Image (tube, rainbow, N blue to C red):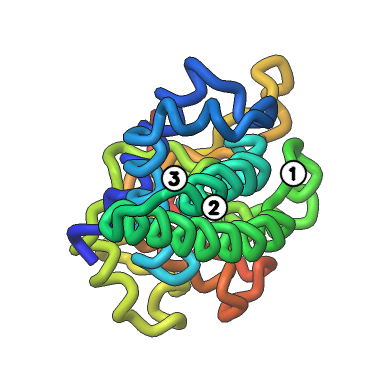
Amino acid sequence: MSEKFYSILFAFEQLRHLRKDLQLKMLTNADLLLHKEKEFRLLLEYLYDALNCIEFDPRLLQLVTEVQGLEEFFTVLKQAYSKEVLNMTGNNEKEMRFRAIEQIDGIMQQLGMWNSLAQKMLGPGNLHIKELGNHPKFPHDRFFVFVKELAPQNLKVLHPYHPDQVRAQMARETKDLLAFDEKDPLSGYRLYWDSRETHSTGPRIAVKNGHHRLFEIYRRYLAGLIDGNEQVEFAYASK
């Protein structure tokens, strides 16, 4: 897992480079794609590895929700490779193109699944907070958070995810992940959705401790193993 764990970060970086020159939604000319084949091949390798590294990796939600036009992009790229293969005579070059086409097929199949999973994400706003209720020790000691709030893009974390720590959390029982740990509690504070409305907290959470544990909790939510309305208990940490 360690080798492929960071592939999604490389894929994001590659997409950022491509978006400087190309608007993914505007790509309709297959010939144009072949002028950037090296960049596209790198993107295919990184994204294919990312999609096949960790089942229900929550970071992939950010990819499908923030990068618009991915499916259209890969459709056009596949057409370009398929058209090119017909005019090739070298076996090595053909094998490389066929591998690219297989990767595109695998990526597109997974993107369809992730677009469906994206429907499980909370939308912007504070309405769900009213359903949550206050912790008896709120606001100075502890507060509750819905599992469905824990998408990585809704969290502000202190440092990136590390594969060894992710693996350690994956080995834990669900009841242990959800239980409040007095010695090593989930901790942080809510970020306001609108700074002018300090009476109403927003969906983002600044996490001071436990973001690898939250990664695994949300991963199991995406996999259908934890109810999104399950509540986890946070210790309040000052800013």
Where is residue 168? Give x, y as percent. Answer: 24, 71
Q: Earlier in the sequence, mark 2 or mark 1?
A: 2
Where is residue 111? Give x, y as percent. Answer: 60, 57
The C terminus lies in quadrant: top left
Under tag 3, what secondary structure?
Answer: strand
Which kind of residue does numbered mark 3 sit on?
Tyr
The residue wearing badge 3 is 236
Q: CA distance from mark 3 to mark 1?
A: 24 Å
- Horizontal arrangement in the rendering, residue 135 relative to residue 214 (left or right): right
Q: Residues within 10 Å of mark 1 (few under 14, many from 20)?
A: few
Question: Residue 148 versus residue 32: which sits nearer the camera?
Answer: 32
Q: CA distance from mark 2 to mark 1?
A: 39 Å
Under tag 1, what secondary structure?
Answer: loop
Which kind of residue does numbered mark 1 sit on?
Gly
Question: Residue 233 versus residue 172: which sits nearer the camera?
Answer: 172
Q: Residues within 10 Å of mark 2 (few under 14, many from 20)?
A: some
Question: Residue 221 versus residue 27: which sits nearer the camera?
Answer: 27
Q: Earlier in the sequence, mark 3 or mark 1?
A: 1
**Closer to the observer: label 3 or label 1?**
1
Q: Earlier in the sequence, mark 2 or mark 3?
A: 2
The residue wearing badge 2 is 82
Which kind of residue does numbered mark 2 sit on?
Ser
Where is residue 99? Give x, y as percent. Answer: 38, 61
- Horizontal arrangement in the rendering, residue 212 relative to residue 77 (left or right): left
The label shown at residue 123 is: 1
